[in-house]
Image: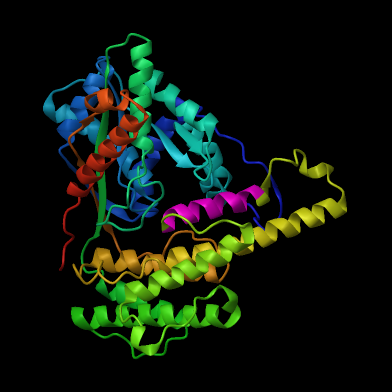
Amino acid sequence: MVNLDRVQPAMKHLPPNLQPWVVSTAKLILPVWLRQRCGITEIEERNIERFIQINQQFQAGKVRYLLAFRHPTIDDQFALFHLFAKATSHATKQMGIKLERPIHSYYVYDRGIPLWAGNLATWFYPRTGGISINRGKLDRQALRTLRQTMVDGDFPLAISPEGDANNHNERVNRLEPGAAQIGFWTVEELAKADRQEQVMILPVGLQYEYLGNPWPNIDRFLMDLECECGVDKAPLRSPTMTERYQRLRDFGNYLIDYTGDFYQRFYRDHMPEPKPDSEHSETIGDRLEQLLDTILRIAESHFKIKPNGSFIERCRRLEAAGWEQIFRNDIPDPKSRAPLEQGLADRLAKEANSSLSHMRIAEGLAAITGDYVVNHLSASRFVDILQLIWRGIRSAKGKSFGRAPYLGKRKCTISIGEPLVVNDYYREYSSSRAGAKTAIADLTNNLQTAMEHLIFPSCLA
């Protein structure tokens, strides 16, 4: 892992360097990796004939397409690899269809992932078709690579319109407009080259459920988190779902109160004026929203950033500002610095990383929503929230995220949606600047709806 408390050279764009032998080796390892590393022992594909059909059209030169996938976990890349490497081959044999060549995809990943995933990820991702992008700024080099890949790449491009993993199996974050914009750029480039391919966006849903009875492990996970936070409560022994939810709710209230008291005590200048007792909000959501705003303002004040935009947008700006002070473009050779320059640069990096730790705590607390679990008391939803809280606690302790504790075997369901034809929106996109904004918004909203329709209720047993 990179030490973010010390100054680092600027992060370079990692272009794809697809190596067939690496992909072939990964295919052989994949089943064992899914079982042993991810705990995924079953995979179901829904409507895979749509996936096969669009790849037939792609290989016939009729279509260029972007695969837009839901991103609930850090294991999604391996599930998608299974879709391309294993599921499609099995389905085409059953259907009596023969594709012209094996299918694969290029894919987009956040340039920051190798910072915590290590050197293996830095080596592996480009060689399996990965294209790095710095999500916190306008990464022109990455965008240029994405456009070239969509127009002339041997394989389609996979991207998560949610941006980052949202850690909710049954909730789609508000989509970013990047997928739609890439689609329109591709239509433009094909038109300039007098090419007739249609451009499509294929929605793909990914969802995970625990097999068997995961509740004893979930209860133990909750109690371990309570213990980490100094909460002294009686052990959970065969609780009812109502009792289990109340315990989770009480824990969420405790975290909000404890964290709020901490920031009130030590960061009082950033806290809002206390409201009269009669105006106090009784909802978790309102209290949490105020606390998250306060925590982000502390980090924003360090970087002199105005607190504008959504929670996710503010986190992105903070991350970009922090990385500018850690990964320095103005210091090309770290070994050439004088000791004084090194010391001051390290101090700046350490202060930036310390300020970013507030943002990471806020990201963990953001999981404590008032409706996600109570609306559907399933094991999947309980685990989604507990794992986000676990991440927040690790951030507060200064530890990297890593992989959450193992809670049992899982099933992954891959659902293929109906493709959206980008060309159908292009007339409005090309009409004017205002028309382009409207077309991007319409396509993004329709993609959002399509991805939400791929979610199914998790098992309550």
Query: Residue at horizontal 59%, vertical 76%?
Result: 269
Q: Magenta segment: does it hold 319?
A: yes
Query: Residue at horizontal 58%, vertical 44%?
Result: 119
Query: Residue at horizontal 32%, vertical 23%?
Result: 430
Magenta span: chief secondary structure: helix
Foreground of the two, 198 or 121? 198
Q: Residue 393: where, in percent of width, then height?
A: 48, 71
Q: Which range is magenta?
A: 311-324
Query: Residue at horizontal 33%, vertical 80%?
Result: 281
Can you tell which quarter of the image residue 351 is in? Answer: bottom right
Judge whether 198 appears above or below 330 on screen: above
Drawn side of residue 295 relative to residue 446, left or right: right
Judge whether 251 appears above or below 16 on screen: below
Drawn side of residue 334 relative to residue 105, left or right: right
Judge whether 108 appears above or below 460 on screen: above
Image quarter (top left, top right, bottom left or bottom right) of the C terminus: bottom left
The residue at the far left in this view is 95
Indicate how the structure is coloured in the image: rainbow
Question: Can residue 412 be seen by looking at this rendering?
Answer: yes
Q: Residue 426: where, in percent of width, then height?
A: 27, 24
Judge whether 372 appears above or below 334 on screen: below
Q: Residue 389: where, in percent of width, then height?
A: 41, 69
Foreground of the two, 264 or 159? 264
